[in-house]
Image (tube, rainbow, N blue to C red):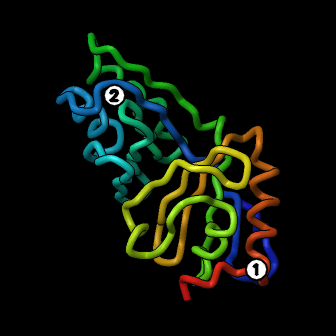
């Protein structure tokens, strides 16, 4: 983990490694529910939601895709559990841990930092704990969710990780605040 910012609106750090599994299939099937529970001990999340308990999460990414997040060392076992639960069912389960850069944005102005770069409604009534957004951070695809009080986790492709790190560092500097969340 490395701290990317000087004191400012929020502290931004790159975190990892985190285990991540992209899981595609029929999200409404009982087999999928069993697979998600076997892998991370959580239910299938509703649309645009993330279920989290401790270090494990299941996030809705699209009508047929979930992102399972867990400790890196647990990925192989979770993949085996998914394969067993979905045997004979049409699905795709892939370890995408190394494909993603993961950032944590912390502080009372964390919403401001994200609002500067993401075209998503981040007002507290529209975006709170348990919400997940797939959107953009400036010009690149990302997803983020609240991972604690005044804390967000953002994921992006590793190939643009340095760009996202720089973008977050600049966005965390004082000045140019959106000013609607104070």
Q: Earlier in the sequence, mark 1 or mark 2?
A: 2
Q: Residues within 10 Å of mark 2 (few under 14, many from 20)?
A: some
Relative to 137, is 121 above or below? Answer: below
Residue contact at pointers 1 and 2, CB within 8 angstroms: no
Say left or right for 49 vs 117: left
Q: Which mark is residue 41?
A: none
Relative to 83, is 120 above or below? Answer: below
Residue extending farthest top: 88
Q: How many numbered marks does the figure carry?
A: 2
- As measured in the structure, the alpha-carbon distance from the residue carrying label 1 to the one carrying label 2 is 47 Å
Q: Nearer the viewer, residue 94 or 71?
A: 94
Comparing marks 1 and 2, which lies closer to the viewer?
1
Q: Nearer the viewer, residue 41 or 5?
A: 5
Residue at 38% over, 74% down: 125
- Image position, residue 38 (x, y; %): 28, 36
Q: Which mark is residue 176?
A: 1
Say left or right for 87 vs 1: left
As helix, strand or loop, the secondary structure at mark 2 comes to: helix
Q: Nearer the viewer, residue 113 or 83?
A: 113
Q: Quadrant of residue 128?
A: bottom left
- Image position, residue 181 (x, y; %): 54, 83
Q: Quadrant of residue 110?
A: bottom right
Q: Quadrant of residue 80?
A: top left
- Image position, residue 129 (x, y; %): 39, 67
Relative to 161, is 81 above or below? Answer: above
- Image position, residue 122 (x, y; %): 51, 69
The quadrant of the image that shows the N terminus is bottom right
Q: Which mark is residue 81?
A: 2
């Amino acid at each position: 983990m490395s701290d990317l910012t000087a004191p400012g609106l929020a502290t931004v750090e790159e975190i990892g490694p985190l285990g991540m599994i992209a899981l595609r299939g029929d999200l409404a099937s009982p087999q999928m529910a069993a697979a998600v529970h076997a892998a991370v001990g959580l239910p299938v999340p509703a649309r645009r939601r993330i279920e989290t308990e401790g270090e494990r999460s299941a996030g809705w990414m699209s009508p047929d895709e979930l992102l399972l997040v867990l400790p890196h060392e647990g990925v192989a076992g979770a993949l085996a559990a998914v394969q067993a639960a979905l045997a004979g069912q049409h699905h795709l389960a892939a370890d995408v841990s190394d494909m993603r850069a993961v950032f944590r944005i912390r502080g009372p102005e964390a919403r401001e930092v994200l609002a500067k770069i993401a075209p998503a409604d981040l007002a507290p009534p529209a975006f709170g704990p348990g919400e997940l957004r797939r959107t953009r951070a400036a010009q690149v695809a990302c997803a983020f969710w609240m991972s604690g009080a005044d804390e967000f986790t953002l994921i992006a492709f590793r190939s643009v990780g340095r760009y996202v790190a720089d973008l977050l560092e600049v966005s965390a500097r004082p000045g140019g605040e959106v000013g609607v969340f104070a």
